[in-house]
Image (cartoon, coloured by chain):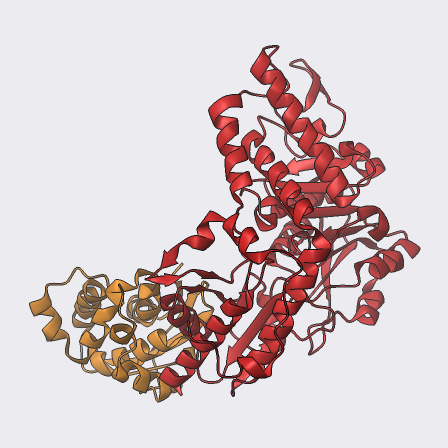
Chain colours: A red, B orange
């Protein structure tokens, strides 16, 4: 790999951990793509999995597979205990007061849909409103639109500025006595912006409005403390935090979860069932109908353990280095513009290049073994706000290296040579 | 290994930089929009049909180099063709970009043969097909929106 010409001019620091050892924990990082070493910079789409996560899923199916909360046999008891233990670990990971407030879902999207349908639908009336922001992922827009169609409520979106920062005053101006919920993203997937969630929760709570936080992009990068944020709902996805796909978490304030009707009906979420009526199981089972994602929960447990071992402070520190280095290098390429320049940013670098469509950038980088995302990132209102049809996005995880940033920059210079 | 040079041939890059028939057509009697949600490509194709023939074809929109160059070369290729001829050309073009066309037949495609390298990039076939889908929709219905997703 040829380092970018500019590299020596820009400071290179060392990671706060043994990066080679960390990379060795992720088997996929050793593979080659189109004859080149894989440079995986699409972590905001999904993260790679350490061997311990892969082993946890394999071990479950190899040695421990059984359904939970039913059999009296050995394997079922083991599986149940392991499943419940991960719930405790999740509660610790986000500092939830109790594991009863941790609901397993299939992902952040399902968590938001659950809140829309179980919390929102029974109480929303025509003329009520829900406030989101312009930087939401489609998963924090469409469930509310569906809810508004069902109830006659209105969806309003707070503006963002040219740096991609939330206009907090603009958000505050949207809050009325008919606002029933504020739903906003903790970290923007398209811009990298870290929102001042704690102060927004405080603003909303002053008016008695609950707040849902979409933490899909925050959980892999930041220490999340739901009690400190004081949010009412928090969702994230396992696969973005180095765990398996098909597993996510909804945290909720206990009084709200208690008052909400079930999201889906089925086995495991009931206390008693007769043909006339059923009574529901206490939290968290009330929201987990059917056989849950038992193997994925095992994988999620291993993923959170792995993140704990590395330490989220270390993760954040190294990702800030990667972002700063990549930002400096990328700005040296003429005709390149970064979309999303908030002061507080996670390691997401969205950009556009004069005269080259992001999709072409993606294909040319892919030819070098470099995986980035090109498109609207399921955030079309963000694209509209910045007047671009799409962006290219490199998103970093703690296992990325400065050499990989150099490879990205070299790839972008190839793109430029080809098109300009 | 897929050949990047085979995909981004000079002619494609030229048509991306300076597309032909890249204009709004005010006297069009057929119009269709094409959307590719994957990459955010959107384009509009206009046609003027008289006596069963495409007298003029134009397009506008934003998209990647492949979709723009494809629309540019398509508008040039279909002028003077009947609906049936244009649709048959689309069929052969589709065969070319998916690697299913006989190499001898590829030669009959003229300049459109420049897209033969696409068959090694299946994910980009949609980009090249977008304008053709819009063309087909415009031929079949006077005012249509199509999506390649």
Q: Residue A96 location in percent, x, y?
A: 80, 40
Q: Nearer the viewer, residue A230 or B67?
A: A230
In the picture shown, does residue A66 fall above or below A85?
above
Q: Is A174 left, or right, of B139 in this rendering?
A: right
Q: Nearer the viewer, residue A198 or A82?
A: A82
Taking the image as drawn, is residue A176 in sight? no
The structure residue drawn at horizontal position 64% and vertical position 70%, both measured from the top left corner, is: A13
Q: Residue A90 location in percent, x, y?
A: 71, 39
The structure residue drawn at horizontal position 54% and vertical position 42%, both measured from the top left corner, is: A244
The structure residue drawn at horizontal position 72% and vertical position 76%, both measured from the top left corner, is: A161
In the picture shown, does residue A150 fall above or below A285?
below
Q: Residue furthest left?
A: B104
The structure residue drawn at horizontal position 50% and vertical position 22%, both measured from the top left corner, is: A63
Quarter location, residue A367? bottom left
In the picture shown, does residue A166 fall above or below A16?
below
Q: Residue B64 location in percent, x, y?
A: 40, 75
Taking the image as drawn, is residue A78 in sight? yes
- The mark total stands at 0
């Amino acid at each position: 790999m040829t380092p970018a010409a500019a590299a020596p001019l820009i400071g290179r620091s060392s990671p706060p951990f043994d990066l080679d050892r960390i990379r060795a924990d992720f088997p996929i990082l050793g593979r080659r793509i189109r004859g080149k070493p894989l440079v995986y910079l699409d972590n905001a789409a999904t993260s790679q999995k350490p061997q311990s996560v892969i082993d946890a899923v394999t071990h479950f199916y190899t040695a421990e597979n059984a359904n939970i909360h039913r059999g009296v046999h050995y394997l079922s008891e083991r599986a149940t205990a392991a499943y419940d233990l991960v719930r405790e670990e999740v509660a610790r990971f986000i500092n939830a007061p109790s594991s009863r407030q941790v609901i397993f879902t299939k992902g952040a999207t399902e968590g938001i849909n659950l809140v829309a349908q179980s919390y929102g639908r029974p109480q929303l009336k025509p003329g009520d409103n829900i406030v989101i922001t312009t930087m939401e992922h489609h998963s924090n827009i469409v469930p509310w639109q569906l809810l508004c169609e069902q109830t006659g409520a209105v969806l309003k979106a707070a503006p963002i500025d040219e740096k991609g920062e939330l206009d907090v005053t603009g958000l505050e101006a949207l809050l009325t006595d008919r606002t029933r919920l504020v739903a906003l993203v903790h970290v923007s997937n398209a811009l990298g912006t870290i929102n001042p969630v704690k102060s927004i929760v405080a603003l909303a709570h002053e008016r008695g409005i609950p707040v849902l936080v979409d933490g899909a992009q925050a959980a892999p990068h930041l220490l999340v403390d739901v009690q400190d944020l004081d949010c009412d709902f928090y969702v994230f996805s396992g696969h973005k935090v180095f765990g398996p796909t098909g597993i996510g978490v909804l945290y909720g304030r206990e009084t709200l979860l208690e008052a909400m009707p079930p999201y889906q009906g089925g086995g495991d979420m009931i206390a008693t069932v007769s043909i006339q009526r059923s009574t529901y199981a206490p939290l968290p089972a009330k929201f987990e109908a059917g056989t849950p994602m038992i193997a994925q929960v095992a994988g999620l447990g291993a993923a959170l353990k792995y993140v704990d071992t590395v330490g989220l402070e270390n993760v954040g520190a190294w990702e800030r280095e990667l972002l700063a280095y990549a930002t400096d290098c990328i700005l040296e390429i003429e005709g390149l513009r970064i979309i999303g320049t908030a002061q507080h940013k996670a390691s997401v670098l969205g950009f556009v290049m004069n005269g080259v469509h992001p999709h072409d950038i993606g294909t040319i980088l892919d030819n070098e073994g470099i995986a980035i995302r090109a498109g609207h990132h399921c955030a079309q209102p963000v694209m509209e706000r910045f007047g671009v049809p799409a962006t290219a996005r490199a998103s970093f995880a703690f296992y990325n290296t400065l050499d990989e940033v150099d490879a990205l920059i070299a790839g972008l210079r190839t793109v430029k040579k080809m098109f300009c | 290994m897929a050949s990047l040079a085979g995909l981004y041939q000079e002619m494609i890059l030229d048509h991306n930089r300076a597309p032909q028939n890249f204009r709004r057509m005010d006297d069009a009697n057929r119009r269709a929009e094409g959307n590719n949600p994957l990459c955010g490509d959107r384009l509009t194709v206009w046609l003027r049909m008289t006596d069963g023939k495409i007298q003029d074809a134009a397009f506008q929109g934003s998209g990647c180099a492949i979709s723009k160059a494809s629309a540019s070369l398509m508008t040039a290729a279909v002028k003077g063709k009947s609906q049936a001829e244009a649709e048959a050309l689309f069929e052969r073009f589709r065969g070319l970009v998916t690697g299913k066309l006989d190499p001898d037949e590829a030669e009959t495609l003229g300049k459109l043969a420049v897209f033969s390298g696409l068959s090694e990039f299946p994910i980009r076939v949609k980009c090249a097909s977008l304008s053709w889908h819009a063309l087909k929709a415009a031929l079949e219905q006077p005012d249509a929106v199509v999506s390649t997703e």
